[in-house]
Amino acid sequence: MKISSALGDFKIIQTASNKDELLILGSWNDLVKSFDSTRAFMVCRDTQLFGVYLCKQECVEFMTKAIQQIDTQCWEGQNKTSALEHSKYLA
């Protein structure tokens, strides 16, 4: 799944060896905005692609944060109170 938000551009992949583990790919700058730099590792030197492994729950929290960064100023007549404003979700 590809995600673009104010946090950056990411691709999320489920690992084949562990179904409860997800790999988030992105640029170094985008990844270190959301994750500790010690967790990021280089995936491809040519494209400067880096990755971070996450459990499903941590990925849900990251995706919730990314979705909350969507600019809703241009949405007319929308109720701004939504499920996204809650901070706890289960994977």
Image: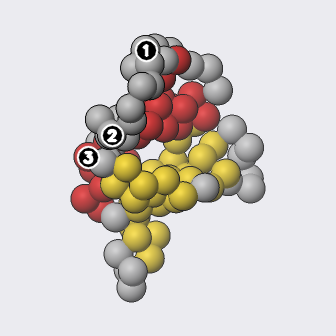
Q: Residue at the far bottom: name it.
A: 46
Please tell me how crowded label 3 is: few (under 14), some (14-19), or many (20+) other residues with Cα within 10 Å. Answer: few
**Direction from residue 81 to residue 11 in the image, left or right:** right
Taking the spot 43% from the left edge, 14% from the top edge, the residue there is 81
- Element on which disc 2 rests: loop
Q: Dividing the image into 4 quarters, which one contains the C terminus?
A: top right
Image x and y of residue 23, in percent: 55, 52
Judging depth in this view, the residue of 50 and 80 nearest the camera is 80
Please tell me how crowded label 2 is: few (under 14), some (14-19), or many (20+) other residues with Cα within 10 Å. Answer: few
- Element on which disc 1 rests: loop
In three-dimensional space, the C-alpha distance between marks 3 and 1, rounded to whole angstroms, equals 26 Å
Among the two numbered marks 3 and 2 on one chain, the one whose residue lies closer to the N terminus: 3
Q: Amino acid at mark 1?
A: Thr
Q: Residue at the far front: name it.
A: 77
Taking the spot 60% from the left edge, 47% from the top edge, the residue there is 22
Among the two numbered marks 3 and 1 on one chain, the one whose residue lies closer to the N terminus: 3
Taking the spot 67% from the left edge, 53% from the top edge, the residue there is 15
Residue under label 1: 81
Residue 80, picture quadrant: top left
Q: Amino acid at mark 2?
A: Cys
Q: Which mark is residue 33?
A: 3
Q: Is residue 53 visible?
A: yes
Mark nearer the viewer, 3 or 2: 2
Q: Amino acid at mark 3?
A: Lys
Residue under label 2: 74
